[in-house]
Image (cartoon, helix red, strand yellow):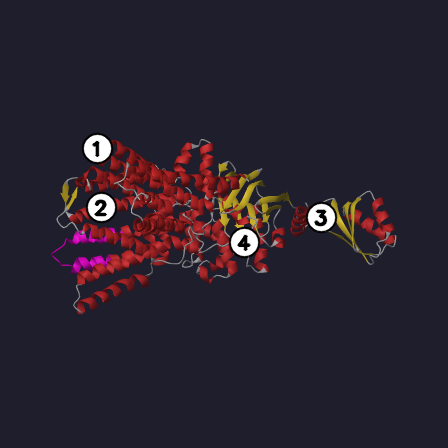
């Protein structure tokens, strides 16, 4: 099927002159590196990473930014072009010239590569998948920014660098397992496991980017896809954590879900009108639309709640001893802290006191989780006050739950007042 | 028959209500001038109607289609030109149109490009890069992009801004020709004289709510109408002769007399022949008259009258 968005990029990016100049430039680079005695394989892979990975990621980042900044986004939103067409048209169209250069690098690599210590096919696969992963991640993040109605600037390297850092950190994790990776008790060869993992995350990034593009084009998405992603992520992590013990598994599952709650709290749109819309839908008993429009951080919190309830019962059923009761108290207090933080984020957004509410939220978290507990730990002998900020496994079940619960009550008291004062009254006036 | 029905539309920016329970209907085949001061909510209203922004309350129906529930279906039936529109700078004018036509899934694209380009008068520039076009040509290209799929309903936000007088006149002709093809237009502009040339309805927006929505008449229609407001200019206003006022009061077809300096304004119920007879009587009576003219109720006057009336209220 023909894709008008992809065709537009072909018209814009490809010309005979550009097609000719790229291989000439690459041959010249390879020749110079060979002349000075550099490793030609490494040079070609480095050029691929530079051209397709980093430069391509910059192009993908621009694909959305430029539509907004050049006021052409409205034309695309006013056309009946599908979200899928627009997504892959932008993803591969905007990077077509970077891929063209990358293909030349990989072809030269295949013809010149004679290193015996790695498989050429594996290397090619990893190179292509890494580039695709980084492009998709950058594209997804730029869509998140568009949907959040954040002010975009003509910067093109912020998102690619962030995505590269994430990717490098994932590479460093895998590089620690030279003897193979144990997943659900089976040992897998490190490189192939890495390739399959990349394919797994690329598939989810594609689904995510498609859903975000649908949202940008005013389609409604089912939150079930988000829930499915979290469950798949749990399963993926679970495979790695089989030897960590039940508590470790449950904690990691909860931590990964909670991490997404915090990320989504910062990245999703939290305008007052949006919450009024949700309230209207609830009052009209339009639960199906309410469900589709529910914020994804809410869905994630529901899942985190289910994990905590399940974990608590399971641990208690396993053995109702003092140590397990303390573990449960930590689980429950973690959930309570999460609820408190959600309350703080919403309160800051509704109050209207802050120009950049998300920056204020991060500052609050730095104070609550780092500076204040540090100060109290230094200034007092007791760690009871620290319970205001961190779950403590070595204190009583009663205190470790009651203290953060009191905070939640206080935060939600202010939140409800703020909602009535700044949101409800305003919209009823 | 109404083509667009808007009910109780409300939209908010953080801390500011841009549209407040806006309701109106537009007749099929009409050209409506959307006017109002800066910050009145004109652009927000147009973007909501184009389903580019989602209001927090209200409904928009284009015919039977719920625009807010099915924005992508609505986009097939409407065109929108933003006040800050952009064009793809690396493409030629023809490629810009080709891309939009393909995005709309149109058939016989080359023929459609030619027809639309001729319609807006950019045929000679189709092979030029969009950056090489003048301001007026870029504006026409953007309008061509908005109408290439032959929408039923066209929304235009400040389409004449930055255009020279000749280009504005051409634009008025274009809008009239689109209307003649059955298209319904909603045009926002600050240049009221220009709107007067083609608009047959007026929608005044102020601080997010509709101040006035009424049909306005063109000069040709005004000439045909029986009742008109006339203005008598006197050579000497100090004082306005009482005999003249009494005379006018005695005329059955004269009402609503108003005196302002050397001007006497009144409603006259009669055609051109009636006006000539009145003037002849006044001259024979030797009143100090130097001119008699019909007061044009153009868009600017109507707008100012409405705003003034609202301020007085």
Helix, strand or loop for disc 2: helix
Q: In which quarter of the image is the C terminus of chain B?
A: top right
Cβ atoms at labels 1 and 4 below 8 Å apart: no
What residue is pinned by disc 4? B159
Total label count? 4
Nearest the camera: A271 or A210? A271
How far, Cα to Cα, is label 1 from label 2?
39 Å
Q: Is residue A94 visible?
A: no
How far, Cα to Cα, is label 1 from label 4?
76 Å
Cβ atoms at labels 1 and 2 below 8 Å apart: no
Q: Which residue is drawn at 86% across and 51% down?
A: B242
How far, Cα to Cα, is label 4 from label 2?
52 Å
Subunit of mark 1? A
Foreground mark, 3 or 2?
Answer: 2
Residue B223: assigned label: 3
- Crowd band around label 3 with a 10 angstrom C-alpha radius: few (<14), some (14–19), many (20+): some
Q: Which of marks 1 and 2 is nearer the N terminus?
A: 2
What residue is pinned by disc 2? A197
A46 up-or-down from B153: above or below: below
- Crowd band around label 2 with a 10 angstrom C-alpha radius: few (<14), some (14–19), many (20+): few
Q: Residue at x 44, y 46 (%)?
A: A349
Subunit of mark 2? A
What residue is pinned by disc 1? A321
Is A175 a magenta residue? Answer: no
A357 up-or-down from A302: above or below: below
Helix, strand or loop for disc 1: loop
Q: In this picture, which residue range is highlighted in magenta?
A: A103-132
Helix, strand or loop for disc 3: helix
Foreground mark, 3 or 1?
Answer: 1
A4 up-or-down from A308: above or below: below
Q: Which residue is drawn at 39% across and 51% down?
A: A359
Q: Do labels 1 and 4 share a chain?
A: no
């Amino acid at each position: 099927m023909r894709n008008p968005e992809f065709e537009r990029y072909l018209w814009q990016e490809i010309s005979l002159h550009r097609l000719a100049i790229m291989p000439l430039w690459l041959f010249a680079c390879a020749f110079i590196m060979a002349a000075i005695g550099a490793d030609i394989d490494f040079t070609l892979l480095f050029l691929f990473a530079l051209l397709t990975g980093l430069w391509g990621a910059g192009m993908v980042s621009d694909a959305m930014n430029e539509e907004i900044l050049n006021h052409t986004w409205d034309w695309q939103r006013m056309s009946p072009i599908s979200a899928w067409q627009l997504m892959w048209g932008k993803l591969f169209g905007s990077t077509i010239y970077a891929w063209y250069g990358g293909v030349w690098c990989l072809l030269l690599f295949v013809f010149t590569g004679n290193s015996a210590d790695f498989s050429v096919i594996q290397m090619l696969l990893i190179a292509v998948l890494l580039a695709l992963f980084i492009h998709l991640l950058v594209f997804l993040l730029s869509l998140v920014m568009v949907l959040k109605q954040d002010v975009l600037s003509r910067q093109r390297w912020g998102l690619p660098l962030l995505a590269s850092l994430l990717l490098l950190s994932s590479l460093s994790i895998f590089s620690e397992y030279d003897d193979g990776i144990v997943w659900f008790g089976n040992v897998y060869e490190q490189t192939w496991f890495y390739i399959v993992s990349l394919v797994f995350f690329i598939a989810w990034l594609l689904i995510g980017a498609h859903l975000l593009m649908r949202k940008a084009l005013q389609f409604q998405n089912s939150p079930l896809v988000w829930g499915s992603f979290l469950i798949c992520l749990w399963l993926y992590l679970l495979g790695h954590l089989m030897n960590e013990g039940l508590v470790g598994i449950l904690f990691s599952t909860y931590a990964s879900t909670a991490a997404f709650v915090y990320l989504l709290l910062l990245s999703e749109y939290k305008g007052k009108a949006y919450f009024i819309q949700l309230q209207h839908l609830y009052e009209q008993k339009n639960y199906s639309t309410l469900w589709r429009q529910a914020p994804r951080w809410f869905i994630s919190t529901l899942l985190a709640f289910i994990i905590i309830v399940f974990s608590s019962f399971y641990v208690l059923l396993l053995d109702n001893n003092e140590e397990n009761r303390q573990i449960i108290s930590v689980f429950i207090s973690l959930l309570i802290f999460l609820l408190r933080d959600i309350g703080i984020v919403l309160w800051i957004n509704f109050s209207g006191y802050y120009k950049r509410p998300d920056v204020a939220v991060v500052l609050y978290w730095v104070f609550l989780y780092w500076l204040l507990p540090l100060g109290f730990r230094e200034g007092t002998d007791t760690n009871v006050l620290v319970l205001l900020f961190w779950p403590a496994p070595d204190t009583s079940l009663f205190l470790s739950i009651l203290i953060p619960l009191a905070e939640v009550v206080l935060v939600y008291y202010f939140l409800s007042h703020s909602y009535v004062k700044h949101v409800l009254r305003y919209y009823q006036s | 028959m109404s083509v667009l029905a808007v009910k109780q539309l409300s939209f908010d920016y953080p801390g500011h209500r841009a549209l407040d329970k806006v309701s109106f209907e537009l007749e099929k085949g009409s050209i409506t001038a959307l006017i109002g001061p800066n910050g009145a909510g004109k652009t927000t209203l147009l973007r909501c109607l184009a389903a580019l922004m989602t209001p927090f309350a209200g409904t928009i129906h284009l015919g039977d289609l719920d625009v807010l529930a099915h924005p992508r279906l609505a986009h097939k039936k409407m065109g929108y030109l933003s006040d800050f529109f952009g064009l793809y700078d690396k493409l030629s004018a023809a490629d810009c149109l080709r891309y939009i036509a393909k995005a709309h899934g149109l058939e016989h694209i080359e023929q459609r490009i030619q027809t639309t380009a001729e319609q807006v008068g950019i045929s000679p520039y189709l092979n030029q890069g969009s950056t090489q076009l003048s301001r007026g040509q870029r504006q026409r290209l953007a309008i061509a992009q908005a109408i290439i799929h032959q929408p039923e309903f066209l929304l235009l936000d400040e389409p004449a801004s930055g255009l020279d007088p000749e280009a504005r006149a051409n634009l008025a002709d274009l809008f009239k020709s689109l209307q003649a093809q059955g298209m319904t237009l909603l045009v926002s502009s600050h240049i009221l004289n220009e709107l007067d040339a083609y608009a047959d309805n007026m929608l005044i927006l102020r601080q997010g709510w509709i101040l006035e929505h009424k049909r306005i008449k063109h000069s040709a229609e005004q000439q045909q109408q029986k009742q008109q407001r006339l203005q008598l200019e006197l050579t000497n206003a100090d004082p306005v002769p009482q005999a003249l006022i009494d005379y006018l009061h005695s005329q059955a077809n004269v009402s609503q007399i108003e005196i302002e300096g050397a001007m006497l304004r009144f409603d006259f119920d009669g055609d051109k022949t009636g006006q000539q007879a009145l003037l002849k009587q006044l001259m024979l009576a030797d009143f100090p008259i130097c001119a008699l003219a019909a007061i044009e109720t153009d868009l600017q006057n109507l707008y100012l009258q409405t705003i003034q009336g609202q301020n007085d209220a």
